[in-house]
Image (cartoon, rainbow, N blue to C red):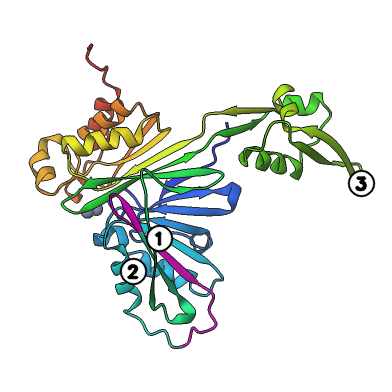
Amino acid sequence: MVPVFHPRFVNDPFDDPCLYIDIQREGRAILFDLGSIERLEAAKVMRVSDVFISHTHIDHFIGFDHLLRLLLGRDKKLRVFGPPGIIRNVEGKLSAYTWNLVDDYKFNIEVHEVSVESISTAYFIASEGFRRRDGEKRLWKDILVEEPLFTIQAAHLDHKTPSLAFSIKERFHININKDVLTRLDLPVGPWLNELKRSFREEKPMDSKFVARLEKEGGYEERLFTLGDFIENRLVLITRGQKVTYVADAAGSKENKETIVRLAAGSDTFFCEAAFLDADRDKAFKKYHLTAKDAGGIAREAGVGRLVVFHFSPKYGENPSDLYEEANREFTMESPPP
Ligand SMILES: [Zn+2]
Ligand SMILES: [Zn+2]
């Protein structure tokens, strides 16, 4: 299966959190958190369409200025999702600069402030000097973003301030069987993307589909229904990819239960592990998870792969202890009921 999401951290696990998720199929990327992004190549920054902020402690939001600097001259909309207060936070960042020469700029920012039950939106448009313009408020539950390719879910955690956790889930995965292409004498080409799009739009199975096939120096058109491709097994629909990201959160029972629900069945689970279990009093005081917490949550949520990050600098000499503790707990057999 060719994955749709390609997540990778911009920095090492001791530095600011920022998970860059490339969605190559759509020529765009999203960010979970926005710590320093100085190390991210400009071409990659340009692809960012959406940013999801867990909370606005400085190590999770300081990259905003750098992102703004690179996107400013673009004809582009940036969407920012974040916890209560995010509209004021973005407004504060923008009001730190002078915007008298940007009347003809096309760039704009849409900020979605995610409270437990509602989402408030505000707009900041470059050509208006980024003056805040308040928009609509809507109710929401679980799902923040819904697109043909994926949905993004969020949950509120407690970090002595609200901290959002996020899951991105491909709605379903479309596999193209190359052997069937050969058997039916169908060439690869742009028509396959067209075909995938029709499945993504969930058109009825008896919808007509004209395949525009590239054949020696020209095109040949062949008529199918979408159902034909299921029947001849060219298209196989399987479960979609799921990636979950959990940053700073206290190791409370309530937080853990919320994370297990959000992360359930993830292919990859990125989870903060600031401290070792031996230092859990420090983790408790600072409202952070331990490596053992991360491993236990991953096991309960039945994830495929656990990636821990956001280590306290005190383990700078010995991060392997954190990986080992998380992994030991993750791979431990669950006690019999
Ligand atoms: Zn924090
Ligand atoms: Zn942090």
Circle 2 sits on which residue? 90
Q: x, y (%) of residue 233?
A: 70, 23
Question: Mark 3 Cα within 10 Å, few/some/many (few <14, many 20+)?
Answer: few
Compared to residue 87, the image places residue 329 above or below, namely above
* Residue 280 seen from this side: yes
Tell me if I can see residue 321 in this picture.
Answer: no
Q: Secondary structure at mark 2?
A: helix
Relative to 176, residue 285 above or below: below
Q: Amino acid at mark 2?
A: Val
**Residue at the (44%, 68%) spot, across then down:** 109
Label 1 neighbourhood size at 10 Å, few (<14), some (14-19), many (20+)? many
Compute the Cα span from label 1 to label 2: 9 Å
Q: Is mark 1 within 8 Å of ligand 1?
A: no
Above-or-below relation of 294 to 112: above
Residue 79: % across, % down: 44, 61
Mark 2 residue crowding within 10 angstroms, few (<14) / some (14–19) / many (20+): many
Disc 1 is placed on an element classified as strand
Q: Is residue 296 magenta?
A: no
Q: Is the C-beta separation of discs 3 and 2 under 8 Å?
A: no
Span of residues in magenta = 101-119
Front disc: 1 or 3: 1
Are the two marked residues, 1 and 3, in contact with CB atoms closer than 8 angstroms?
Answer: no
Spatial separation of the CA atoms under disc 1 and disc 3: 46 Å
| Quadrant of image for the C terminus | top left
Q: Quadrant of the N terminus?
A: top right
Residue drawn at x 47%, y 64% as measured from the top left: 78
Kindly identify which numbered label has been placed on residue 80.
1
Q: Secondary structure at mark 3?
A: loop
Distance in Å between CA atoms under marks 3 and 2: 53 Å
Q: Label 3, on which residue? A: 217
